[in-house]
Image (tube, rainbow, N blue to C red):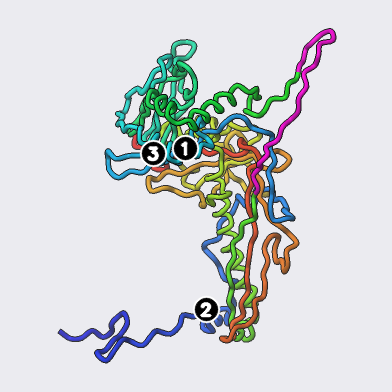
Amino acid sequence: MSAPDSVTGPVTDESGPAAPAENPLTSLSTHAARQLATTHKSEPQMRGISSRWLIRRLPWVDVGGGTYRVNRRLHLGVGRGRVQFEQNGADDVRVIPRTLAELPALRGYADHDVLEELAGRFSVHEVRAGQVLHEAGRPVTETFLIVHGRLTRYTAGRYGEEEVLGVVTDGDHVGDEAIGRPDPLWQTSVRAETAGVVLALARDDLRELTGRAPSLAAHLAAHTERQRLPVNRRGEADVPVRSGHSGEPTLPGGFVDYELTPREYELSLTQTVLRVHTRVADLFSDPMDQTRQQLRLTIQEIRERQEWELVNNRDFGLLHNVDHGQRISTSTGPPTPDDMDELLSMRRATRLFLAHPKAIAAFFRQCNKRGLVPGSATVNGHHVPAWRGVPIFPCGKIPVSGSHTTSIVAMRTGESDQGVVGLYQTGIPEEYEPGLNVRWMGVNSSAVVNYLVTAYYSLAILVPDAAGVLENVQLGRVAD
């Protein structure tokens, strides 16, 4: 067999290792630079540029001190978070102990040893489609954590029909609201719509552990006492007022209390070092300035990353910071008009929907099946689809999971409307665009000019109901 004409990979001989490859270039080569120096040409094009509707539609607040504090009225209601699980096999499923503090009755409880013992008392149960976990009016004897599966909360309607009140899915919990209450009863029934797995904690086990753990007993007692305090319909500390009186009754008095530990948002950043060889900048900048073109495309990439962070960052991104009380799941999988109406009804003055393009297509398919035609809205000269007059903007930064599901976000925007706002700082040194600066870092020994390009930004949700998420949005086509 003859030797091949060429081989790939490093070449070695018996005398020793191959000579190291040349160092990779750190700036634009002259060969590439010539593409802008001859013929009639266009500016460099970039496929990665998207519409970036989130950045364009957010009202931006200039944060002079680099930190934005969101002051709120004191909230006495305890929010409902989601627990997490670890699984080492089909039958070895365990709740992560520290995430039990996401249950309203255990919010703020930090005794890890007690949480560890409590986590060990949950038992694994498989549920089948159609199985009823509990019925309304029965005594609450167990607390359930949903490992995976879709369950429906329902009750009997006024006219005898079944009235669906919501869906619970992975990480949700039912029955925990009865913790600390004497002889509680189920307010709704829960039925499994798909096969799944749940963890169950017997009420007697919790009572026995509470009797042995004084810290847990004190925490639950404080939680019970907190529930007795007067609140308004949003769970905020109530201000006593009186109306419709006659004569000269004594008017109630009070004050509006504030949260003592408001959340503060520090500006995040995205930055990179742009490198341009002096030979390229000097000799190949006619008719197009090489440095300016390199900078233009670099800024486009930074802005793309900025929008991704506004959606996905765990500290301030939309998908991770929307209140769990403002998250709902699709009723059947695909995003139906009913689901969009439910999401829309959770807040006042919704300004926009944000969805992956495939989620918009999935919603249109559901509208087509029902014979509905979604409306449209004109935004800055662009025609975009709309539902109930609220524009639906595409955003490819919203992730699609491996199970082909995604999320749809609804938002109210603006500082004056207690909505969602973008944060940046203007007037920074060597500012090139609002909130973005370009700083010259000198010329290195290889005659390469370095520029530090930085964008400063963040995002704040001023009140919990300013943003909501429709989760578990199925993208695939459902067979007829």
Residue type, mark 3 in image: Val
The one of 414 and 114 positioned closer to us in this rendering: 114
The C terminus, quarter of image: top left
Q: Look at the numbered disc 1 and give the secondary structure of its residue.
A: loop
Based on the picture, tell me whether residue 383 belongs to the magenta stretch.
no
Per the image, label 2 sits on a secondary structure element best described as: loop
User: Which corner quadrant holds the N terminus?
Assistant: bottom left
- Is 249 inside the magenta-drawn segment? yes
Instruction: Determine whether, in the image, residue 245 is placed left or right of residue 55.
Output: right
- Which residue does the numbered mark 3 point to in the structure image? 95
Q: Residues within 10 Å of mark 1 (few under 14, many from 20)?
A: some
User: Residue 261: horizontal and vertical position, in percent?
Assistant: 65, 41
What residue span does the magenta drawing correspond to? 242-264
Give neighbour class at mark 3: few <14, some 14-19, many 20+ (Cα, 10 Å).
Answer: many
Residue occupied by mark 1: 82
The residues bearing labels 2 and 3 have C-alpha atoms spaced at a distance of: 48 Å
Which x, y percent locates residue 438? 67, 69
> Residue at point 56% right, 38% down?
323
Q: Which mark is residue 26?
A: 2
- Sooner in the amino-acid sequence: mark 3 or mark 1: 1
Q: CA distance from mark 3 to mark 1?
A: 11 Å
Q: In the displayed structure, does residue 194 sit left or right of residue 349? A: left
Image location (x, y in percent) of residue 41: 58, 75
Of helix, strand and loop, which one carries label 3? strand
Whether residue 383 appears in this view of the structure is: yes
